[in-house]
Amino acid sequence: MNNALRNTVMKRILVFGAHPDDAEVGMGGTIAKYARQGHTVRIVTCTLPDKSEARLQEADAAAAILGAQHQCLRINPEEMRFDRKMTTALDEIISEFDPQIIFTHWIHDSHNDHQVVSNATIAATRKNTCSVYMYEQTIPGGITPFSFRAQKYIDISDFIEEKTRSLEAHISQKSKYGEWWLYGVKGRAQYRGFQIQKKYAEAFEVIKDIEC
Ligand SMILES: [Zn+2]
């Protein structure tokens, strides 16, 4: 493929996660798949909730397994609220990275910080220059009165190993939740895969689907 053609098809894909591991749980297989296809994928973590430096290193290692860049905004956890400052922080990333596709949290996720990032993403993409999708509620997650409307499916059958390894890179979380955490994440990918007659898949809700 010559460079001119390559430039026309390669995309910049931005993945917002409130905390380290959110992106991997929600869409680690998709990130690995896009990266393998040659797209530039950047995971942006907004805040480090506890054991900051260890969690940052885990997130860097997980992103490397998936073939993605990792950036941490280091927003104070106490300042994780949907306001002008949060939206501006995401605005700046979007202006600099200029993505064609953005993934963010599900807006009805039960975690406050996840909702904040989802709302801020919607506000920061108000110019409608790229597609925006939401990945499923992070695991573990609380029960909510809303249903996730799986609208876009991505076959990750060939990338479940990368997804699993990226989760295992979050050593602190694996020791906190145990093997059941991995079973839960992998089980959901199996369920989504079964729905589209593949081994594993990840599902997304569409906020806007823009192709230029
Ligand atoms: Zn989280």
Image (tube, grey):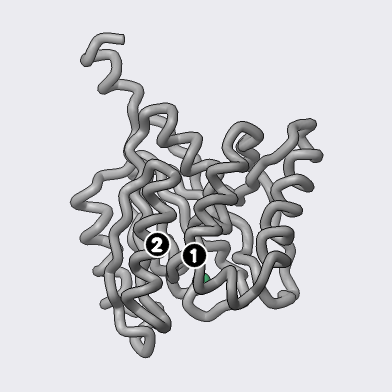
Q: Residue at x 54, y 58 (%)?
A: 167
Q: Residue at x 59, y 50 (%)?
A: 164
> Can I make out residue 195 in this image?
yes
> Can I make out residue 128 in this image?
no
* Secondary element type, mark 1: loop
User: Percent x, y for residue 12?
Assistant: 32, 39
Q: Residue at x 47, y 58 (%)?
A: 104
Contact, CB < 8 Å: mark 2 with mark 1?
Answer: yes
**Is residue 44 shown above or below 27?**
below
**Mark 1 lies on residue:** 170
* Secondary element type, mark 2: helix
Residue toward you, 159 or 7 = 159
Mark carried by residue 59: 2
User: Percent x, y for residue 58?
Assistant: 41, 64
Residue toward you, 46 or 86 = 46
Residue toward you, 129 or 29 = 29
Q: Quadrant of the N terminus?
A: top left
Label 2 CB sits under 8 Å from any ligand 1 atom: no
User: Percent x, y for residue 175?
Assistant: 59, 74
Q: Quadrant of residue 16?
A: bottom left
Q: Quadrant of residue 61?
A: bottom left
> Which of marks 1 and 2 precedes in the sequence?
2
Q: Residue at x 79, y 31 (%)?
A: 197
Q: Quadrant of residue 56?
A: bottom left
Residue toward you, 126 or 38 = 38
User: Percent x, y for residue 163?
Assistant: 56, 48
